[in-house]
Image (spheres, helix red, strand yellow):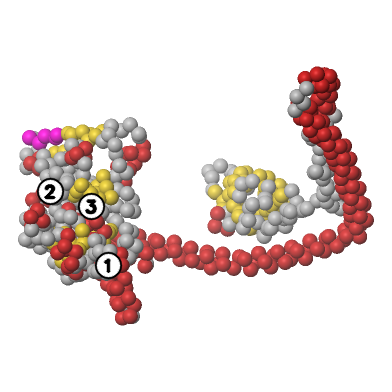
Amino acid sequence: MDLELRCPSCKEYYRSPVYLPCTHSLCYTCALTSIQTTNEHHHNQSTLDISSTSFASDLDKLSLTSDNDSGVLINRHSPSSSSSSSSSSSSSSSISSSSRPSSLLLPPALPEISSTSSSSFLPTTPIRHQTNKSYTTCLQCPVCSKIIFMDISGIKSLPKNRLIADIVNRYLGEKSSEQQQQHQQQQTPKCQLCRPSEERPITRICEQCRIGYCDQCREQYHPMRGPYSKHNFLDALQQFSNNSNEKIFCHEHTNRLATSYCLHCRLECCQQCLIHTNHDIVPIHQASKLYKTQLSSQLQCLSEKAKYGAEFLAKLKLYPDYIKKNGEIFEKNLIKDIDKLILTLENKKQELLTYIHKEIERKISLIHQQYSTYNAHIQRTTGFLQFSIEALKESDPYSYLQVCHGLNSKCSSIYGSFSDEYECKAHTSYEFDFTFNTECLYREIHRLQFQQIKPPLSPRFIAEQCLCHDEQSSTISGTLAWSMRDVGAIQGFILELDDGTFASEFREVYDGTETMCAVDGLLPSNVYTARVKAYNQAGESAYSECITLHSSS
């Protein structure tokens, strides 16, 4: 659980966590420092209000489905449609995106929500068109990379995640006081303008600059005069403290307590909120109980899965011991079989080793002979090159012309000998052109074969699936089903049936790879006995335990 209580941005325990529309959370300080100003391109675009996280996944699916989805047509009914159905009108707006990010999420606390009603427990996503209120800031979730747009209120438009704050307090409360003190020292945010060697705790946070200051840096870099006189400072201790008893006020009427919950918008509201008139409104405690019941049922199913997984892990933990034991047994059997061949293989081994030694000597002899011949030729060539270089230094033209034709002829002859007699290729390979054939271990001593597959284990019938089917005709059909613990090395099954008559024998009725067989033509008022066996290329398994089928009269 420790990982769930740490901020994905700073990797520390949550401090005043805020809840993002993408269902992730961030520390207030991390969210404040991650705020960015929206570009003019985003201001000119139509926007979507997403108060339900289901739209986020739909938007992702839309982007993944098509690369050229230039727009989505959204129809919205006017709020007065509930009072006058005959005069209701729908307006549509096209939402286009030339460069769509991974997902665009807007905070759920903005006005003018669609009046589309929903009676289901899981609310539909309310969609809102562009309003007069512009989105001036945004931040990107560090977990899912979705972009959350916010209005001028900034981080204040995001709700506090009081649940995580309470759990963090309880979790840290279980630690010793010494660990808590150490945690507080480690978690205290430092001033963003202090030198690394002189970092002091943050005491004030500028809401406009989004920078945390200590007292000294605030006086030095952010004096309350001039253009900074209108900036608002927040108390750092108040921002980092979690108050679980804080009262929740309505998003639209900030002076009234939120006593209800809109299942459609997933927002807390008061009794005077007209925008939720046609929505499913329940008391906030009842909504909490409903969602807790939903989560409890899901956790129960998840707990069963985890229980089965834990039981499987317990069994799987014993597998290495079983493998070691079976490996020891297999090793003993292997040694026993090889010991039977040692006396015969010893003579053959000496013979093959002698052959290999002779082959090694032969190859080395060829290489030595080639090396000697080639070395002598290289020495003659090197001597000729040195002599020719000295001849080129001769200043007397008569002396040089006397021997130049002979030198040219000899040079051509030596050059041709490199391509004809002295190729740059070894006369023999350093690899051996034969392999040791190890097939047919017992038939021929010169070959060795490793038997990897053994006959399979006996299958067993599934009694619950073995039954007879009554039909209106004079014959009855039956179904037989069986299973195998390990079907990896099985080629097929053979099903045999005995009709129970005098001096009857089992006869084969099925041969195949399926583990279920339907048998037709059974006589009424008769008792049939069935058995099955498995086979592979190594042989057949023993028969399974017999099962009887009683056909009705």
Report the Cα–Cα distance between label 3 and label 2.
Answer: 22 Å
Secondary structure of the residue carrying numbered label 1: loop
Residue at the (36%, 37%) spot, across then down: 65
Q: Are marks 2 and 1 in contact (CB under 8 Å)?
A: no
The residue identified by callout 2 is: 111
Question: What count of labels does the image hold?
Answer: 3
The residue identified by callout 3 is: 35
- Between disc 1 and disc 3, the foreground one is 1
- Between disc 3 and disc 2, the foreground one is 3
The residues colored magenta run 87-91
Q: Nearer the viewer, residue 146 or 271?
A: 146
Secondary structure of the residue carrying numbered label 3: loop
> Disc 3 residue type?
Ile
Packing grade of label 2 (10 A; few <14, some 14-19, many >=20) is few
Counting residues from the start of the chain, the first of labels 3 and 2 encountered is 3
Give how far across and how far down residue 450 sits, in percent. Answer: 78, 53
Residue at the (29%, 44%) spot, across then down: 103
Q: Nearer the viewer, residue 117 or 36?
A: 36
Secondary structure of the residue carrying numbered label 2: loop
- Between disc 2 and disc 1, the foreground one is 1
Give how far across and how far down residue 209 sits, in percent. Answer: 17, 55
Q: Do the residues labelled 1 and 3 touch (CB within 8 Å)?
A: no
> Disc 1 residue type?
Glu
Packing grade of label 1 (10 A; few <14, some 14-19, many >=20) is some
Query: Which residue is outermost to the front?
Result: 396
Q: Nearer the viewer, residue 202 or 517?
A: 202
Report the Cα–Cα distance between label 1 and label 3.
Answer: 23 Å
